[in-house]
Image (cartoon, rainbow, N blue to C red):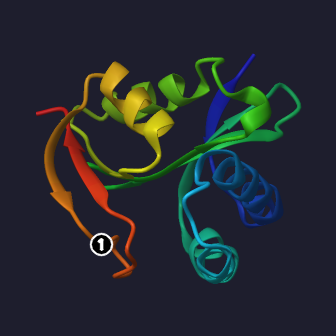
Amino acid sequence: MITIRLSRPDDVDRLFEIWRSAVEATHDFLKPEDLEFISGQVREGYLPEASLHLAVDRDDRPLAFMGLEGDSIDTLFVDPAHHGRGIGRLLIGAARARGLPLKVDVNEQNTRAVGFYERMGFRQVGRSPLDSAGMPYPLLHLSEA
């Protein structure tokens, strides 16, 4: 059984494992040096500070995580060993329970993620040629509304 809970400081190592393995499985478009730079930011800056929604197994082991900022999903990563099992859908459902139409930015080259969000009912409402850090990885802006 999978449940959802908020992250705790002792989750950071496992969440970084999930993030890194998911990125390696889905972000083959990243230059190696960019991946290393981003990894440092995620490991040292984002994960220790963020309040995240975690999907955990019956042993309380995180399988996926999602970050929400208002009505925006700022991260959603699922351990690749658990892709295709409805965990991402479960996290989106938890976000939808807040009653706000959701938005998300997704890397254009991450076609699996784009397909996932489209299956979840999101539609493209814009595009940026650079990511939020100014790197040359285009973002698609998706929205439910």
Q: Residue at x 58, y 54 (%)?
A: 27
Quarter of the image for residue 64 reads top right
Check the picture and name the quadrant holding the N terminus: top right
Q: Nearer the viewer, residue 19 or 57?
A: 19
Residue 51, position as x, y percentages in the image? 53, 61
Q: Residue at x 80, y 56 (%)?
A: 17
Residue 10 appears at what percent x and percent y? 81, 63
The residue drawn where x is 83% and y is 40% is: 61
How many numbered discs, if any?
1
Q: Secondary structure at mark 1?
A: loop
Name the residue carrying label 1: 130
Residue occupying image coordinates x 36% and y 50%: 108
Looking at the rendered structure, the kind of residue marked 1 is Leu
For residue 119, which quarter of the picture?
top left
Residue 60 visible in the shown view: yes
Crowd rating for badge 1 (residues with CA inside 10 Å; few <14, some 14–19, many 20+): some
Left or right placement of residue 93 versus residue 85 in this view = left
